[in-house]
Amino acid sequence: MAVTPPRHRPLDAQVIPRFAGIRTFMRAPHTTDLAGVDAAVYGIPFDTATSYRTGPRFGPEGIRSASALLRPYNPGLGVDVVESLSIVDLGDFPVSPGDTERTYAQVEEALAPVVEAGIFPLALGGDHSITLAELRAVAKKHGPLALVQLDAHGDTWEEYFGQKFFHGTTFKRALEEGLLDPHASVQAGMRGSLYGAADIEDAREMGFTVLAADDLRALGPDSYGQLVLEKTRGKPVFLSFDIDFLDPAFAPGTGTPEVGGFSTAEALAFLRSLRGIDLAAADVVEVSPPYDGPGQQTALAGANVAYELLSLRALAAQAQQR
């Protein structure tokens, strides 16, 4: 059976150079028409819920600019993302600076038709509080999700500065709302000083599998991938990648940097080990361009992480076509 080529395709870099054109993710068409779309990238430029350095509101813009360097074929996973998926950039969803809960409602409303259409949604953040709104929208269609989180922080606090909705409380709220299955979920990369041992142990008591950075490094990509596949089997997966998973030597442009993190090469290996998961939605959060280096290495890392997530989805699309 002949496979219909994707309707939406990025600009051809051999016709229009990569330094030219309007900045969309991977130079994909900007449209809100969902017809013929397999994957939709969108921004949530919101950082009201940060606890230290603001700036992730500029993350979607920074990631899009860096993504101009991306090419269609991913040799690490052996997949042509552009040939496998019809990809568009929906632009940025509306947000309300200073009002987290109103922003959640706006994101949920904007994301609902994307999810209902069966399109793979990939968000560019924004601080990590935005993930709660995404989870609400995706769980309405799929039910409780398996969370695969790569992050320096677990984000399962009860509150911060008296606020229930904050970038450090996201996954506790999600659990309380029935959006996640904790026993099918894996948090990995946690490190840094804590307010107390409960910062990590509470997440384990909630049912999450929690891998501190040293444990993840000892486990390695292959064993990590096997663990995630076993834990998430039979469940749709939401993958959330906080850029502070990377060491600040590789990603200085983030709100709460923690030393002792991972290199970009290690991050790619962990992501590629997840081949075969049922990826329903994903995001890349906490990229803060005001704190990035002159080469925008954090934004570049974020763009490549997003590309790997699209590649995992493209592999699944290929498997379905066989």
Image: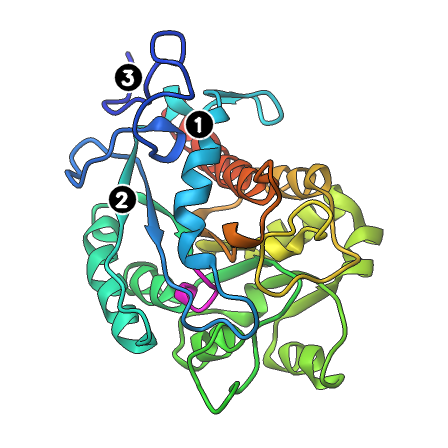
Q: Does the magenta stretch include residue 130?
A: yes
Is 209 drawn above or below residue 1 in the view shown?
below
Residue corresponding to mark 3:
5
The image position of residue 296, as x and y in percent, is 57, 40
Residue corresponding to mark 1:
68
Q: Which of marks 3 and 1 is in front?
A: 1
Q: Report the span colored magenta.
A: 126-131
Direction bottom: furthest residue: 162
Q: In this view, does 193 lie to the left or right of 92?
A: right
Q: Residue type at mark 2?
A: Gly
Q: In which quadrant is the C terminus drawn?
A: top left
Q: Is residue 7 left or right of residue 200?
A: left
The image position of residue 34, as x and y in percent, is 18, 39
Nearer the N terminus, badge 2 or badge 3? Answer: 3
Q: Classify mark 1: residues with Cα within 10 Å, few (<14), some (14-19) or many (20+).
A: many
Q: Residue type at mark 1?
A: Ala
C-alpha separation, residue under disc 1 versus residue under disc 2: 15 Å
Q: What element carries label 1?
A: helix
Residue corresponding to mark 2:
91
Q: Does the magenta stretch include residue 167?
A: no
Q: Which of marks 2 and 3 is in front?
A: 2
> Which quarter of the picture shows residue 137?
bottom left
C-alpha separation, residue under disc 2 versus residue under disc 3: 23 Å
